[in-house]
Image (spheres, rainbow, N blue to C red):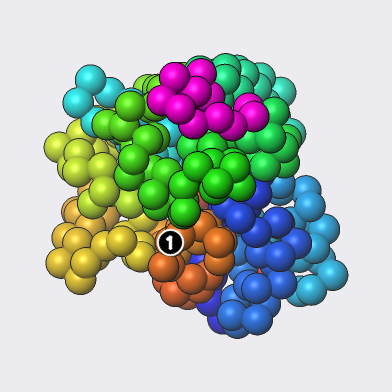
């Protein structure tokens, strides 16, 4: 059987609900998926409930955005205790920052002649983790742009005139937060972060695995991180980074699959047996 361990829902910047994700996972032939919404765990319980009725195993996860002076690094956490009070408190702090960011971006857009309702942006996030994709969708709804891609390219990309940064953890803080929630910390899509030189430091903080198999990795990237994982004694994971059929991303659910063997090794890192 196969697993896809990098999936987003409407609770962060995905366009499919947890139930829709589970249904599509079953249709794609997946027996295990991980819900890894950005900076929120709000969609996990709904995914677990849907998984029980459809025979799809759900791994509770999260994707945390971290930042150093030189790099932005995304950290995945698997098998987390998503009810951990410390985890929830930190995620609430991040969410509050994200909400404030939405209002700041709406103000910037208004000065540029683009009017969107920040409350509508928050509605689109389904009470989860609001971000730029929700702003982009609100802009499309308002007729300000023709597509999500246009919204990013013209206004809200990291170099765009309406961009606003948000609160971020450091990589060390994220790893410790995941470990504190009984989870397994994983370095997400390393070829995108382009910060290989800091991996030894991440290992010293408690990093357990690298996302070797990823939709945005070339064959050369996959080979490099496979060898690096072996060299550093790290486990390997993989996933599509699916964001939904309406997300303007070409990647599909299950485009990247890993075997149960890798899931078993990952779950063993915190003493849980994968069925």
Is 113 magenta? The answer is yes
**How many residues crowd mark 1 within 10 Å: few (<14), some (14–19), many (20+)?**
few
Mark 1: which secondary structure?
loop
One can see residue 82 in this view: no
x and y percentages locating residue 271 in the rendered image: 59, 50
Is 87 magenta? The answer is no
x and y percentages locating residue 116 in the rendered image: 59, 32
Left or right: where 226 falls relative to 73: left
Number of on-image labels:
1
Quadrant location, the N terminus: bottom right
x and y percentages locating residue 218 in the rendered image: 21, 67
Which of the 4 image quarters holds residue 68? top left
One can see residue 212 in this view: yes
Tell me the residue that label 1 is attached to: 249
Q: Nearer the viewer, residue 148 or 175?
A: 148
What is the magenta range? 105-118
Q: Is residue 139 above or below residue 107?
A: below
Image point (41%, 68%), residue name: 250
Q: Nearer the viewer, residue 146 or 235?
A: 146
x and y percentages locating residue 212 in the rendered image: 32, 60
Which of the 4 image quarters holds residue 19? bottom right
Image point (42%, 39%), residue name: 75
Image point (71%, 23%), residue name: 85
Quadrant location, the C terminus: bottom right
Q: Nearer the viewer, residue 153 or 1?
A: 153
Image point (48%, 37%), residue name: 132
């Amino acid at each position: 059987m196969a697993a896809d361990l990098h999936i987003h829902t409407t609770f962060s910047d995905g366009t499919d609900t947890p139930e829709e994700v589970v249904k599509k996972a079953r249709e794609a032939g997946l027996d295990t998926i991980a819900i890894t919404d950005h900076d929120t765990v709000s969609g996990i319980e709904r995914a677990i409930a849907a998984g029980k009725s459809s025979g799809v195993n759900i791994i509770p996860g999260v994707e945390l955005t971290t930042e150093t002076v030189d790099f932005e690094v995304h950290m995945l956490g698997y098998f987390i205790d998503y009810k951990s009070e410390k985890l929830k408190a930190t995620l609430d702090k991040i969410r509050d920052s994200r909400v404030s960011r939405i209002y700041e971006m709406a103000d910037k857009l208004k000065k540029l002649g683009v009017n969107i309702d920040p409350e509508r942006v928050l509605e689109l996030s389904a009470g989860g983790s609001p971000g730029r994709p929700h702003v982009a969708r609100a802009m499309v709804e308002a007729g300000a742009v023709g597509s999500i891609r246009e919204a990013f390219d013209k206004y809200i990309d990291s170099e765009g005139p309406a961009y606003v940064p948000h609160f971020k953890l450091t990589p060390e803080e994220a790893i410790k937060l995941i470990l504190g929630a009984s989870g397994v910390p994983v370095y997400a899509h390393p070829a995108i972060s382009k910060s290989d030189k800091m991996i030894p430091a991440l290992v010293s903080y408690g990093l357990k695995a690298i996302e070797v198999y990823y939709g945005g990795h070339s064959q050369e990237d996959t080979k490099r991180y496979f060898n690096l994982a072996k060299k550093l004694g790290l486990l390997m994971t993989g996933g599509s980074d699916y964001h939904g059929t309406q997300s303007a991303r070409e990647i599909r659910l299950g485009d990247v699959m890993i075997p149960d063997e890798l899931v078993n090794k990952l779950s063993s890192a915190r003493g849980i047996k994968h069925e």
